[in-house]
Image (cartoon, rainbow, N blue to C red):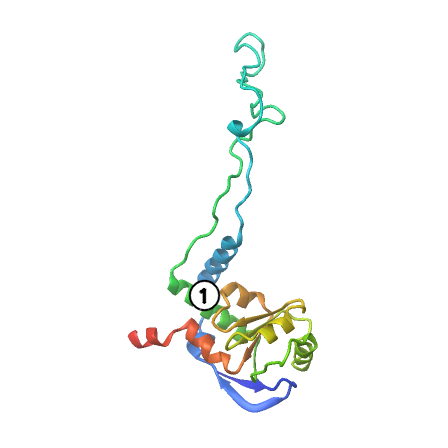
């Protein structure tokens, strides 16, 4: 598939970018998308929720009263879960919620996410740009020119460009990543993908490495 390449002033450059149909025009696999997004969100969970059990409660272990004949519950100590400030039964304990997915499933999910964005016409290709110094107003002017103001935009660059990153840091909803870094969640979360022209090859190689295609 082909997409027009825009200049940073919003005009068309007259050139078109060739995007691989094997990445941007496949039938999205909803199962792979769901599992990869679930994996990302699970890996972000801290898993630090913790309650104290009977052995961790401060208090006497003396038996409160005799076992039988009182008509009350058989409480062994003041730490009983039945009492106020007693230990918690089956409460949450620190744990790792993360899990792994097969590498090929993750790749399929990323391809599916890119195909979803392409199908929604939510991908724009722009000529390469950089700044001499971090300036938020420069990124704002580019977004205004491309009619992307007020949208969640993921800007993909071919390499690390700290001036672009710092220029976009203060704009809500705008993220800047190297083209080989975005995961399925980040792609789907953005309203629009703004890809620099030189970043297309980097993105395609990260999703579908050439050496794997040769082996296949």
Placement of 159 over or under 46, stated as above or below: below
Q: In x, y percent, where is residue 135?
A: 67, 76
Q: Which secondary structure lies at badge 1?
A: helix
- Of residues 87 and 189, the one drawn nearer to the viewer in this rendering: 87
Name of the residue lying farthest toward the left: 215
> Mark 1 = which residue?
109
Report which quarter residue 100 is drawn in.
bottom left
Q: In x, y percent, where is residue 62?
A: 54, 16
Is residue 52 among the parts visible in the rendering? yes
Is residue 25 among the parts visible in the rendering? no
- Of residues 38 and 40, the one drawn nearer to the viewer in this rendering: 40
Residue drawn at (40%, 73%), measured in percent from left and top?
208
Q: Quadrant of the C terminus?
A: bottom left
Q: In x, y percent, where is residue 77?
A: 55, 19
Residue drawn at (52%, 11%), measured in percent from left and top?
67
Placement of 99 over or under 15, stated as above or below: above
Residue drawn at (62%, 81%), measured in percent from left and top?
132
Placement of 189 over or under 90, stated as above or below: below
Name of the residue lying farthest toward the front: 133
Label tally: 1
Disc 1 crowd, CA 10 A, few/some/many (<14, 14-19, 20+):
many
Report which quarter residue 123 is drawn in.
bottom right
Name of the residue lying farthest toward the bottom: 14
Left or right of residue 140: residue 41: left
Q: In x, y percent, where is residue 37?
A: 50, 59
């Amino acid at each position: 598939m082909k997409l027009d390449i825009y200049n940073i002033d919003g005009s068309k450059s007259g050139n078109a970018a060739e995007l691989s149909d094997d990445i941007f025009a496949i039938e999205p696999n909803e199962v792979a998308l769901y599992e990869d997004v679930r994996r990302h969100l699970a890996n972000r969970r801290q898993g630090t929720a913790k309650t104290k059990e009977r052995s961790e409660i401060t208090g006497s272990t003396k038996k409160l009263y005799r076992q039988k004949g009182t008509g009350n519950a058989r409480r062994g100590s003041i730490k009983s879960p039945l009492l106020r400030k007693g230990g918690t039964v089956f409460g949450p304990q620190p744990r790792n919620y993360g899990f792994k997915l097969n590498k090929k499933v993750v790749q399929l999910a990323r391809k599916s996410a890119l195909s979803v964005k392409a199908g929604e016409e939510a991908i724009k290709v722009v000529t390469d740009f950089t700044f001499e110094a971090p300036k938020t107003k420069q990124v704002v002017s580019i977004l205004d020119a491309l009619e992307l103001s007020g949208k969640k935009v993921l800007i993909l660059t071919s390499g690390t460009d700290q001036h672009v990153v710092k220029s976009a840091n203060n704009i809500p909803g705008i993220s800047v990543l190297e083209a080989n870094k975005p995961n399925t969640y980040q792609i789907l979360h953005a309203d629009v993908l703004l890809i620099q022209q030189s970043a297309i090859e980097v993105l395609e190689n990260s999703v579908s490495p050439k050496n794997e295609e040769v082996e296949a």
